[in-house]
């Protein structure tokens, strides 16, 4: 096999010269339809070409690998018979990693199919390819001043239509790029169009990631605040009940050191209940199960004190059932009513 030259061909920045008649567009459309069907035989699906977008340097390298396959008899024979690329052989002769060749295998196959088949001449004519000569260095400075034809989002992008779908056109540019643009005009497959690149997930990825980070931070802060204990309530029935309460007035945890006390908590389920509801249910259970101590019940609050008037349900239950209850509210003893 010949020695691989990674700089033999390149996509040109200059606009390509091609036929734009209705008949030419129709024939080009037929060639595109055949090309898509042939690519399917190589297990290349058109939409997959729009997922990975190699940069200009990588596209030129991919183009040279494709032409290397075409120009080596044993490689093109293998390619057309097996309908796949010989990854190991290409990696060895092109000095490129298997990872690179496998990553861009769909592009390599597509370029090789297009440029190896004379039936796709109108597609070939549209894709502007330069064969680089040794005298190229003399022209480099001049070429550096040429504005890339398909670059610049403000001016949009131009290419031939490969597929139409609702408000989206799938196009192939003269520089071998596969782009999705917004559909803003009537057209047919094979016709050259121009438009604004249709933004997908990748374009909004950074915004989505920022939004996710902010959302996680907010949720994390809320979760931390919700699970943080703001006050502890000790309810001294015949079994002491301990409630951990957050700043929202919700019970985040409940505990009893006795079997009967734990049975109570298992049955009334104080988790995430409002403090007022939890205390009322505990006192109601204690009354029904003879767990009220003689004399009065002492409720001790440590941490932030309970605001007066927030235990309406508990106050009503205590009053209606003539239960004597005292509250040591963060050092200040008071009654519910």
Image: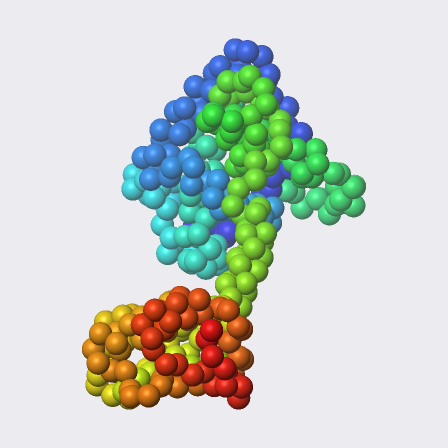
Residue 280, quarter of the rendered image? bottom left
- Seen from the viewer's position, the closer of residues 163 and 190 is 163
Does residue 166 sit above or below 197 in this rendering? above
In depth, the one of 199 and 229 nearer the eye is 229
Q: Quadrant of residue 119?
A: top left
Quadrant assignment, res 312: bottom left
State the residue in front, 77 or 43: 43
Q: How is the image coloured?
A: rainbow
Q: Residue 10: tell me if it is visible.
A: yes
Do we see residue 71 in this rendering?
no
Q: Relative to 305, is 50 above or below?
A: above
**Image mark count:** 0
Residue located at (35% from left, 86% from top): 296
Left or right of 47? Residue 283 is left
**Residue under the point 49% across and 68% down:** 310
Residue 203 lies, in percent from the top left, at 57, 46
**Residue, x 50% and y 82% (percent of image)?**
334
Q: Is residue 239 left or right of residue 135?
A: left
Q: Nearer the viewer, residue 71 or 236?
A: 236
Please tell me whether residue 331 is drawn above or below residue 106 in the rendered image: below
Give x and y (percent) for residue 144.
Answer: 76, 44
Is 193 on the left-hand or right-hand side of 39? right
Image coordinates for residue 89, horizontal then vertical, percent: 38, 54
């Amino acid at each position: 096999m010949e020695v691989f030259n990674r700089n033999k061909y390149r996509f040109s920045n200059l606009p390509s010269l091609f036929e734009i008649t209705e008949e030419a567009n129709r024939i080009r459309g037929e060639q595109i339809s055949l090309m898509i069907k042939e690519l399917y035989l190589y297990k290349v699906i058109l939409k997959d070409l729009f997922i990975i977008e190699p940069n200009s340097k990588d596209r030129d390298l991919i183009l040279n690998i494709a032409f290397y396959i075409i120009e080596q008899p044993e490689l093109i024979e293998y390619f057309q018979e097996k309908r796949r690329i010989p990854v190991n052989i290409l990696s060895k002769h092109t000095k490129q990693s298997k990872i690179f060749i496998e990553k861009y295998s769909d592009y390599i196959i597509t370029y090789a199919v297009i440029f190896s088949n004379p039936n796709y001449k109108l597609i070939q004519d549209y894709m502007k390819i330069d064969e680089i000569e040794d005298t190229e260095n003399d022209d480099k400075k001049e070429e550096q001043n040429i504005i890339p034809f398909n670059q610049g989002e403000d001016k949009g992008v131009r290419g031939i239509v490969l597929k139409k779908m609702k408000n989206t056109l799938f196009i192939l540019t003269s520089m071998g790029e596969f782009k999705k643009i917004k559909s803003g005009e009537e057209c047919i497959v094979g016709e050259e169009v121009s438009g604004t690149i249709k933004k997908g997930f990748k374009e909004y990825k950074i915004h989505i990631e920022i939004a996710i980070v902010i959302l996680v931070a907010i949720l994390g802060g809320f979760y931390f605040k919700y699970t943080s204990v703001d006050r502890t309530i000790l309810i001294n029935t015949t079994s002491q009940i301990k409630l951990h309460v957050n700043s929202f007035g919700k019970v985040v945890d409940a505990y009893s050191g006795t079997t009967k006390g734990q049975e109570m908590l298992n049955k009334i389920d104080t988790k995430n209940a409002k403090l007022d509801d939890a205390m009322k249910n505990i006192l109601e259970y204690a009354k029904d199960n003879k767990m009220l101590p003689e004399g009065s019940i002492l409720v001790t609050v440590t941490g932030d004190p309970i605001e007066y008037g927030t235990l309406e349900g508990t106050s009503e239950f205590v009053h209606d059932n003539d239960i004597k209850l005292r509250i040591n509210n963060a050092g200040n003893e008071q009654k519910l009513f």
